[in-house]
Image (cartoon, grey):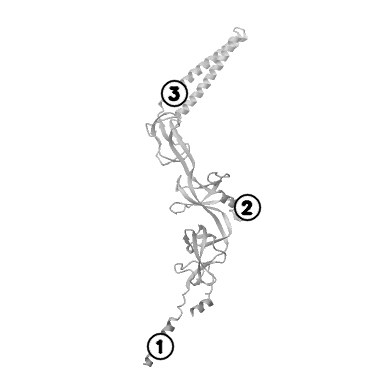
Amino acid sequence: MKPILAGLAACLLLSACSGAEAPPEEQAVPVRVVTVAGETVPNVIELPGRVEPVRVAEVRARVTGIVQERLYEEGTDVGAGQPLFRIDPRELRASYAQTEASLQRARATATNARAVVERYRPLVAENAISGQEYDAALAAAREAEANVAQIRAQLEASSLQLGYTTVRAPIAGRVGRAQVTEGALVSQAEGTLMTRIEQISPVYVSFAQAASEVLRIRRAMAAGELDLDENDRVEVRLTFSDGTEYPIPGFIDFLAYSVDQQTGTVELRAEFPNPQSLLLPGEFVRARIFAGSVQNGLTVPQRAVSLTEDGGTVFVVDAKGQAAIRPVKLGAMVDGRWIVESGLKVGDRVIVSNLQKVRPGAPVQIVRTPTGQAPAPAPAPAPARARGAQ
């Protein structure tokens, strides 16, 4: 009986010793890192903007009459002076003919008055007629000449009115849909709107910036912290609502020097070439304003950042060789890299690979850096951790 009890005791002792063994050491996850370093980064400001045509012309009736014909195709490009509508010219043509006849009659009267003056001139010298009669003839001739000039001006006005019966495009651009149809009565007094023409090559994009931000940029430029390009131009790039980028950059061409009292913003405007008419008036876009460059800025690759509601997070390698999560405040993304406004410092090692396997506090093994630097040696386990595992 004693040998059996001794064997059971030995088995229990071995089992207890086995259960007291330390769990296996957690394997380090191989990762790649980039070391954060100060560099020159663009100062990017993101703002919503709205596309506007550089010129807009409202084509309105300049004479009263009935529209006979529309002479253009809606939604097409037209040139300056191209006929758009024809208004019934018959009434104005008759008025022109009447004025022309009045001019001919006035000219005949003036010719006769001049002839009378010529006949009276030698008679006055011979005292055959009184000076009063000669003066009256001379005044009649002058009055006839003035009447001719007045009717000639009326004829020119009638000619202009007759020319306005053909409604022409005042500028080149894209013409909209017709606001009137054939048979409609248009009025000169009311200035009936007939159509609109918008010049959309180039185009403007207008946006508003907070006055405090504009002040900050001016102070940074005055302090030498913000450098513009050699031409002192501010580049702007656009992104459509579907996320695609407009391929042609534009430049700021207007900055208001007054603040909107209701919104506290300053109006800015950029001009963009639009050769393929991709930018449409009234369209809302996202503008990225490259307001110079900032020295000693920080950036990280896009793949290293996990976006959150408050900004983003990255994994860094701490002094113990473990992964630590770090919240960061993100600026704009330029060329596949996020500009980091806060949360990182120069020298931090940011993990850029195997992010799905990395957990906070887990050991990591740096295998290679994208910049070609030699991998950092694996950190030795901390003594406290080794003692706890025994």
Residue most extreme to the front = 1
Residue at image point 60% right, 8% down: 130
Callout count:
3
- Amino acid residing under circle 2: Ala
- Graded by Cα atoms within 10 Å as few (under 14), some (14 to 19) or many (20 or more), the crowding at tag 3 reads some
Circles 3 and 2: CB atoms closer than 8 Å:
no
Residue most extreme to the top = 128
- Amino acid residing under circle 3: Ser
Up/down of 39 relative to 167, above or below: below
* Residue 9 coordinates in the image, percent (x, y): 40, 88
Mark 3 sits on what residue? 95
Mark 2 sits on what residue? 222
- Graded by Cα atoms within 10 Å as few (under 14), some (14 to 19) or many (20 or more), the crowding at tag 1 reads few
**Foreground of the two, 183 or 286:** 286
**Foreground of the two, 240 or 202:** 240
Q: Quadrant of residue 295?
A: bottom right
What label does residue 9 carry, if any? 1
- The N terminus sits in image quarter: bottom left
* Residue 244 coordinates in the image, percent (x, y): 45, 54
Looking at marks 3 and 1 on the same chain, the residue that comes earlier in the sequence is marked by: 1
How far apart, in angstroms, are the residues tagged by discs 2 and 1? Answer: 86 Å
Residue 152 seen in render: yes
What label does residue 83 carry, if any? none
How far apart, in angstroms, are the residues tagged by discs 3 and 2? Answer: 68 Å
Q: Secondary structure at mark 2?
A: helix
Kindly report which numbered mark, 3 or 2, lies closer to the viewer in this rendering.
2
